Amino acid sequence: MSDLVARVAAGRLSQLADHLRIVMVGGPRQAGKTTLMKGYLADGGGGSYRTLDNADTLRASRDDPAAFAEYGDSPRIIDEVQLGGDDLIRAIKVAVDADPRPGRFVLSGSSRFLTIPTLSESLAGRMAFVDLWPLSMRERTGASEDFLTRAFASPSALLDNSTWTREQYLECVVAGGYPEAVSIPPGVARHAWFDGYLQTVINRDISNFASITHGDAAARLLGLVAARAGSIAVLSDLAQSVELARETTKNYLSYLDMVYLTTSLPAWSTNLTARLLKTPKLYPTDSGLAAHLLGVGASELAEPGHPALGPLMETFVATELLKARSYSETRTSAFHLRSTDQNEVDFVLEGPAGKIVAIELKASSSPGPRALKGLRWLRERLGERLHAGILLHLGTEAASRGDGIYSMPLSVLWGHRQLR
């Protein structure tokens, strides 16, 4: 399926490589980075490709990093570059300083490049980043809409009804976005894929930069993040639940973040008169992986009141917004908001000139007036600064609720297009 789906990031990669010496494509393993870079190589009609996942190539990069960095036609594409270590990064820096033409290197990594201690040499001023996450619903449906740009420009223009059903939403939630995983029907084979994926990432990728003695605990910790997605992340509670020391749990959480398996949503800090909680929320970066860890499929989630429905739906929306922010023409920052008196908004997006688009999610086909409580509370405090308050739901009808607050089907995030 990955060969058939056009990636929005391809355009950004080409644009950045036209102007900068190094472009770094970062994202979780199996998100499609190799396919993206090989496509860029083919479209450009020249260049060279090497992957450090190949043992011989990796050995060559470590034996003589300077020669390795200088070898091959530009653009020199190096996949999983973090495996080459600090010496290779220094050699690449020397190479681009000696010849500062744009488009010299396109690198990829399945760990957060500048946060790994052994890769301490910064390439600031020489490198730009492209985030490649698992497939977004915009990519899976072939939609062209930039939801964030439209929401900040004219939210009322998004008031279209949808043909999506609750069952379709749940099937997409449990499939996630990894290109290979979504091509596998639900069942034993897809579970086996996710099991192998977790084993590779935890036992191989994390082990490349950290000592991890409790691999099973790391997987259980990720499962706990999945089960509590949308809740405030309290480190002591997580440590107690996985039976690890607090410091060990903190380290393991940082490792999961380094390999793009989790993402955090910071608390919004503003001058509201209400007291706001400052603790971030944590989410897995793929709802399909989260559903696998929780052992649920679409049929189980269809049961009224299933405890995993809320966390998985919020993970799905959080990751769709994460992907949308990576390719949107409108630059935004994302937060959550919760006050000490229990008023909350799931997602607070801050855009140009301090404009706010607030998003609340309800895993219901017909949410009642109480579902708007958090958005109306925020409207009272922000006034016109709140550009739009949007309630996303699993129904089919869109409506204005007055005072710049709207209810919309969840599929508005991808222009209501159906899967191809």
Image (cartoon, rainbow, N blue to C red):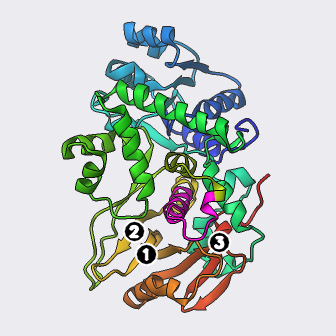
The image quadrant of residue 156 is bottom right
Q: Nearer the observer, disc 3 or disc 1?
A: 3
Q: Is residue 302 covered in magenta?
A: yes
Amino acid under disc 3: Leu
Query: Which residue was labeled with disc 3?
Result: 394
Mark 3 or mark 1, which has the lower sequence index?
1
Give 212 or 142, whichever is nearer the viewer.
212
Q: Residue at x 55, y 70 (%)?
A: 305
Q: Residues within 10 Å of mark 3 (few under 14, many from 20)?
A: many
* Residues drawn in magenta: 300-320
Q: Is residue 293 left or right of residue 149?
A: left
Mark 1 or mark 2, which has the lower sequence index?
2
Q: Residue at x 55, y 89 (%)?
A: 369
Marks 2 and 1: in contact by CB < 8 Å?
yes
- Judging from the image, what secondary structure is the residue with disc 1 in? strand
Give 276 or 288, whichever is nearer the viewer.
288
Q: Is residue 43 left or right of residue 324?
A: right
Query: Which residue was labeled with disc 1?
Result: 345
Mark 3 or mark 2, which has the lower sequence index?
2
What is the spatial separation of the Cα atoms under label 1 and label 2, in whole angstroms? 6 Å
Amino acid under disc 2: His
Q: Nearer the observer, disc 3 or disc 2?
A: 3
